[in-house]
Image: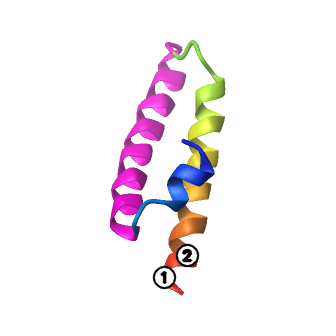
Amino acid sequence: MELKQLREKSAEELKAHLVELRKEQFSLRMQQATGQLAKTHEVRRVRREIARVNMLLGAKTK
């Protein structure tokens, strides 16, 4: 998701999105461990998006 779109979300929506991203990250890690992960770049994309959401949550709570 674009940073611009993430900035428009409220803190509660960002927290919900973060939960979804963590689930996706777990799923990708399991696929990677079992050798079923075809799109290895997805791991990096999810990790970066989690970092973006955490940055915005920190900024919104100040």
Residue at left offset 41%, top offset 31%: 27
Q: Please give the name of the residue rendered at 51% of the width and 77% of the height, measured from the top-left corner.
A: 60
The residue shown at (58%, 77%) is 59
Residue 61 percent coordinates (x, y) = 48, 82
State yes or no: discs 1 and 2 in contact (Cβ < 8 Å).
Answer: yes
Q: Residue at x 59, y 53 (%)?
A: 4
Provide residue 52's location: percent of width, then percent of height. 61, 56
Q: What is the C-alpha distance between the residues marked 1 and 2?
A: 5 Å
Q: How is the image coloured?
A: rainbow
| Residue 14 lies in the magenta stretch | yes
The residue closer to the viewer here, 20 or 35, is 20
Quadrant of residue 47 in the image?
Answer: top right
- Residue span colored magenta: 11-36
Q: Position of residue 50 (x, y in %)?
A: 55, 52
**Which residue is identified by label 2?**
58
Tell me the quarter of the image containing the N terminus: top right
Element type at mark 2: helix
Which mark, residue 22? none
Q: Which residue is mark 1?
A: 61
Which element type, helix, strand or loop, lies under badge 1?
Answer: helix
At label 2, which amino acid type do we have?
A: Gly
